[in-house]
Amino acid sequence: MAEGVGRVGFRKWYERELLSSHAYLVLAFLSVIGLIGSMEAFGLGSNYDKVTNVVSIVVCAVVGAWSLRRYLFLLMRAEEVANQANCSACGEYGRFTVVGEDRSRAETEVRCRKCSHRWTISVID
């Protein structure tokens, strides 16, 4: 989080996190469509076709579960950081610079651009 916010700013970082998380949601949706299509095609064809359909069912289910998990992780991380992006001194939202990062405790120290107040943002990893 600290690298992304330091490079492009909080608002752009937040927007990119939401866009990438929703891309995983689209992947999950496409996996469900593939899963339904594979299940419908299961009854048709030879035994070789059935084995192929079982493999595609398993692949679609695994990709769908992984992408849904990734979507929820990215979305919750972005929301958790966004909930901590208010300066407690002046109330400014999302206008801060990264001062330091403590990776061992998953915390980032930030400074308000308006009033120079410092606070810590906790991040899930």
Image (cartoon, rainbow, N blue to C red):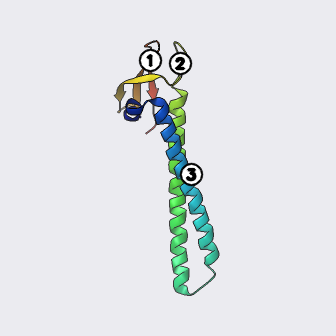
Q: Earlier in the sequence, mark 3 or mark 2?
A: 3
Q: Secondary structure at mark 3?
A: helix
Answer yes or no: is residue 73 visible.
Answer: no
Q: Amino acid at mark 2?
A: Glu
Q: Secondary structure at mark 2?
A: loop
Screen quadrant of the C terminus: top left
Screen quadrant of the N terminus: top left
- Crowding at mark 1 (Cα within 10 Å: few <14, some 14-19, many 20+): some
Percent x, y for residue 108? Answer: 40, 27
CA gap, disc 3 and disc 2 = 31 Å
CA gap, disc 1 and disc 2 = 9 Å
Marks 3 and 1: CB-CB under 8 Å?
Answer: no
Residue in the foreground of this view, choosing between 115 and 70: 115
Q: Amino acid at mark 3?
A: Leu
Identified at 54% across, 86% down, the residue is: 47
Which residue position holds label 2?
A: 92
Marks 3 and 2: CB-CB under 8 Å?
Answer: no
Q: Amino acid at mark 1?
A: Arg
Identified at 35% across, 29% down, the residue is: 102
Percent x, y for residue 118? Answer: 43, 16
Q: Earlier in the sequence, mark 1 or mark 2?
A: 2
* Figure quadrant of residue 8: top left
Answer yes or no: is residue 103 visible.
Answer: yes
Q: Describe residue 92's horizontal placement relative to residue 105 as left or right.
A: right
Q: Earlier in the sequence, mark 3 or mark 1?
A: 3
Which residue position holds label 3?
A: 25
- Crowding at mark 2 (Cα within 10 Å: few <14, some 14-19, many 20+): some
Residue 65, placed above or below residue 115: below
Marks 1 and 2: CB-CB under 8 Å?
Answer: yes
Q: Point out which mark residue 88 bears.
A: none
Q: Point out which mark residue 113 bears.
A: 1
